[in-house]
Image (tube, grey):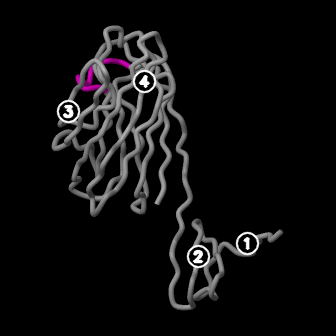
Amino acid sequence: MSILVLTSDTLIGTPATGNIEYNGQFFGTDSNASRAQMQRIVRATAVASTSGTSIDFTGLPAWVKRVTVMFQGVSTGGTSNLLIQLGSGSITSSGYSSVASQATGGATSTAGFITTVTLAAASASARYGQSTLTNITGNTWVVSGLNTPIDNSLVASISVGSIALAGVLDRVRITTVNGTDTFDAGSINILYEG
């Protein structure tokens, strides 16, 4: 069994072949001349989705290439679909190509990534699942997700979409299509990685 011991948190010159260094992040090397940064998966602090009309996660590092938004028992006091919006300096609320579908129908949005399709009893439904946002090139992001209420409907919403941001992603907002329904249960969190 091998044991990795980190003796310093300061990079000293160029690492030798095969070495790993630590300076807030991990670096792997395959030659004396090059090294690649290996970003770890970071879990943000979960936010109770029990009040307000939106939940923001800000201050994402520039190296982020994938963000997973997780929903645990999330509900609102209305029937508007859940929406994920991205931003660079501020939230982008137009230009999205987004669709969510389920066995009984579908919904689209250009204001954000739509994650669910409204159910007859949406205001009483707690949603569970996740949506994964992936940087495909430059500042263009794609999403795929699976979210469902745990009730008697037995229906899941599958969602996909894309957006080209004006700059580097630094924030994610979870809200509703109408922007006025208030969260009243559950929690939301994100994972981000390079």
Assess whether residue 180 is covered by the magenta stretch: yes
Few, some or many C-alpha atoms within 10 Å of disc 4 (few <14, some 14-19, many ≥20)? Answer: many
Who is closer to the viewer here, 8 or 152? 152
Query: Mark 4 = which residue?
Result: 148
- Which amino acid type is shown beneath numbered disc 2? Gly
Query: Mark 1 = which residue?
Result: 6
Query: Mark 3 = which residue?
Result: 109
Q: Are marks 1 and 3 in contact (CB under 8 Å)?
A: no
- Image quadrant assignment for residue 23: bottom right
Query: Of discs 1 and 3, which sits in the foreground?
Result: 3
Rendered residue at 35%/27% (across/down): 157
Q: Mark 3 or mark 2, which is nearer the start of the sequence?
A: 2
Residue 42, placed above or below residue 148:
below
Assess whether residue 177 is covered by the magenta stretch: yes
Query: Of discs 2 and 1, which sits in the foreground?
Result: 2
Q: Which residues are magenta?
A: 176-182
Q: Mark 3 or mark 1, which is nearer the start of the sequence?
A: 1
- Which amino acid type is shown beneath numbered disc 3? Ser
